[in-house]
Image: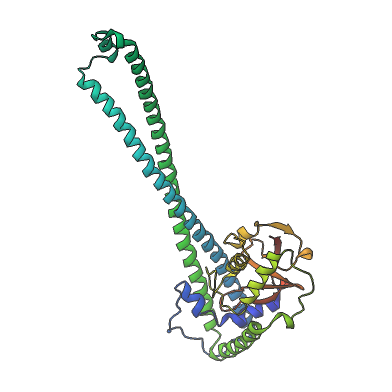
Amino acid sequence: MPVHRRSQLLARALVLTAAATTALGVTTGGSAQAAPGNPDASSRKDVKAQVEQLYNEAEQASEKYNAAQEAQQRLQGETTVLQGEIAAAQDQLNQLRGDLATVAGAEYRSGGMAQTVQLMLATDPEGYLARARSLDQATERQNETLHELVSRQRGLDQRRTETAAKLAELDQARRTLADSKQEIQQRLAKAQRLLNSLGAAERSRMAAQDAQEAEQRATRGTDRLDLGTTPPASERGAAALAAAVRMIGSPYVYGSTGPRAFDCSGLMYYSWRQAGVSLPRTSQAQAYAGQRVSLSEARPGDLVIFYRDMHHVGMYAGGGVIVHAPYPGARVRYESVNAMPVAGVVRL
């Protein structure tokens, strides 16, 4: 990542805070003490590099969190459907068993004599053939009922096996969700401790600079940017970009999809939803949600995926500029597409 990017990261790091940390229950407490004095240039550079790395790791964990959350919701729905099917199948099975029990009870009450023998000894020979035909039909229906009973029992057993597997997946998704949340909390807390080590004067200076730059970015419109004249690839792409631009100035909060706060993939998810398109929840999944094009062919509304592991995503706005939700403490803003390594461009 370019040096100027690292500088931007640290300049905004002081606002790693309320919105982002509260959403995930992160607290740094009031007992942290800054190291006395101001660090020298090499120390500040080292802190910048470490904070940048921690933010990248936190965002990677955030995408795992988003994926686990999406899996949890999907599995919960599938499990609910399967449990409903099991209940219905069990009712049908109980009814079939009741039908067979009724037939067996009737045979027992008749003295245990086979119905064929009873017909042969009957005093009504004229009705024998008709009754024999009825007996054959009844026996056939009874056999069909028995076969259906066995088939339904097998289906019920299969549904129960599927449900058990889904419940195991759901349990794993919940554990992954908790682990990813804890990892985010740890990375953010460590980054805050590093920032505290810079000293009160340094933090104050950086906070003031960050507030000024954040205000400039939040109020900057397309009229002050050279976004070029390349049109969006579609009307929906134009609508999605317009929705993303309206969110400029909104805070970054891990796991959020709007309408007041976003993480990187959450902003894409929200913006394209306003255009009538439902995207996958994570940046890794969004990387495969459409057609891949080269960066030189990017058009407004296209998704731009960053880093080899594809843990960050923004939306191309034109003129080599993206709009994205950067990291904790920062707000949705415009950024150069070259600020991070591009892994791919996706057109929906």
Residue drawn at point x = 64 percent, y = 72 percent? 244
* Residue 274 occupies quadrant: bottom right
In the image, is residue 196 above or below residue 92? below
In the image, is residue 264 above or below residue 159? below
Q: Is residue 147 left or right of residue 217?
A: left
Q: Quadrant of the C terminus?
A: bottom right
Question: Residue 99: x, y in percent?
Answer: 31, 30
Of 264 and 117, nearer the camera is 117
- Say if residue 302 shows up in the picture: no
In the image, is residue 315 above or below residue 73? below
Q: Is residue 193 left or right of residue 286?
A: left
Question: Residue 234: x, y in percent?
Answer: 72, 63
Residue drawn at point x = 34 percent, y = 14 percent? 130
Residue drawn at point x = 70 percent, y = 61 percent? 346
Tell me how many marks there are: 0
- Say if residue 263 shows up in the picture: yes
Question: Residue 223: x, y in percent?
Answer: 73, 82
Residue drawn at point x = 20 percent, y = 17 percent? 111
